[in-house]
Amino acid sequence: MRIELEGCHVDHRQAVHRFHPRSLRPGDGAADLRALCAGSGGESVEARAAIGARSGGGHRCGDACAGSKIAGANTHRATDLNQPMLDHARTRMSDDPRIIWQQADAQALPFEDARFDAVVCQFGAMFFPDRVGAYGQARRMMRPGGHFLFNVWGAIEDNEFAEEVTRALGHFFPADPPRFMARTPHGYHDADAIRADLHAAGFRDITIEPLDAVSAASSPYEAAAAYCQGTPLRAEIEARGVSLEEATRYVANALGKRFGEGSVSGRIRALVVEAA
């Protein structure tokens, strides 16, 4: 997911601290875009959002902004590689005429050079097959003095729900454990590797900050279903020829043993990156 902001001011320091991870629930990010629109002024300039993570599953449908203060923007163009994701996001944001939804690939965005003041990508960089190329796209579209902000998940050991889900599925499938969560969402957490990719794309001024928070769910089953049924992990479970519901309930039981019954919460960590 990527956002390009044209003709507006972004409080970058505040953006870094408010660009936080959210619980894994479909469509939560629509509230972020709504917050962006609510904070926009009425001047005749535009902000464009390009949401193009190659996630394959679309469980972050509609994500758009981290809630940074943005002034002077009144149009937001949100794009995604997956048209059904856009269709779903549109149903959650249909009350705001300033948002225009457009299918596009974040690694080949159809915008001219030096157009945007800022580019923002929320939990998308982990999925790019060519991260240096995607970062190069961001830099290409930025005006002089522009900023690129994005976040990625930290190591799976620092994200308790994801860690327990992966461990439980390892017991459920001992011969062939699904490793999607560790391999992809939590597989791009090395700050030195991120910095090297950004340098290769032409960025020089880079800051990377860890950000800790707590993820909550109303029950162990809700958390298990979010991971097992609402992310690309689902495809890895189904490919092993067992009942998706049976696997989900096994994971829910493991979560309940570790975090308790009823409402549960677990530590999560992301890395917030700013580059110029």
Image (tube, rainbow, N blue to C red):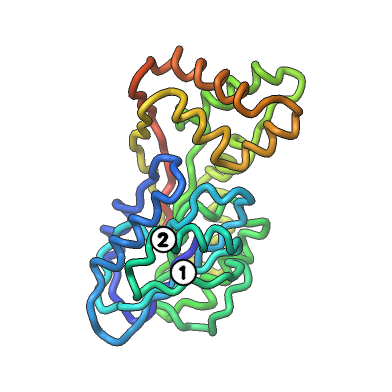
Q: Amino acid at mark 1?
A: Ala
Tell me the number on the disc at residue 78: 1
Of the image marks 1 and 2, the number of the one nearer the N terminus: 2
Q: CA distance from mark 1 to mark 2?
A: 7 Å
Query: Is 189 rendered above or below residue 101?
Result: above
Q: Secondary structure at mark 1?
A: strand
Res 165 visible: yes
Dots 1, 2 in contact, CB < 8 A: yes
Q: Position of residue 8 (x, y in %)?
A: 31, 77
Q: Residue at x 60, y 26 (%)?
A: 245
Q: Position of residue 232 (x, y in %)?
A: 62, 42
Q: Residue at x 61, y 68 (%)?
A: 105
Q: What numbered label is drawn on residue 250? A: none
Residue at image x 55%, y 64%?
Answer: 80
Helix, strand, or loop for circle 2?
A: loop
Point out residue 98 in the picture as x, y percentages from the top left corner: 35, 75
**Residue bearing mark 2:** 64
Q: Quadrant of the C terminus?
A: bottom left
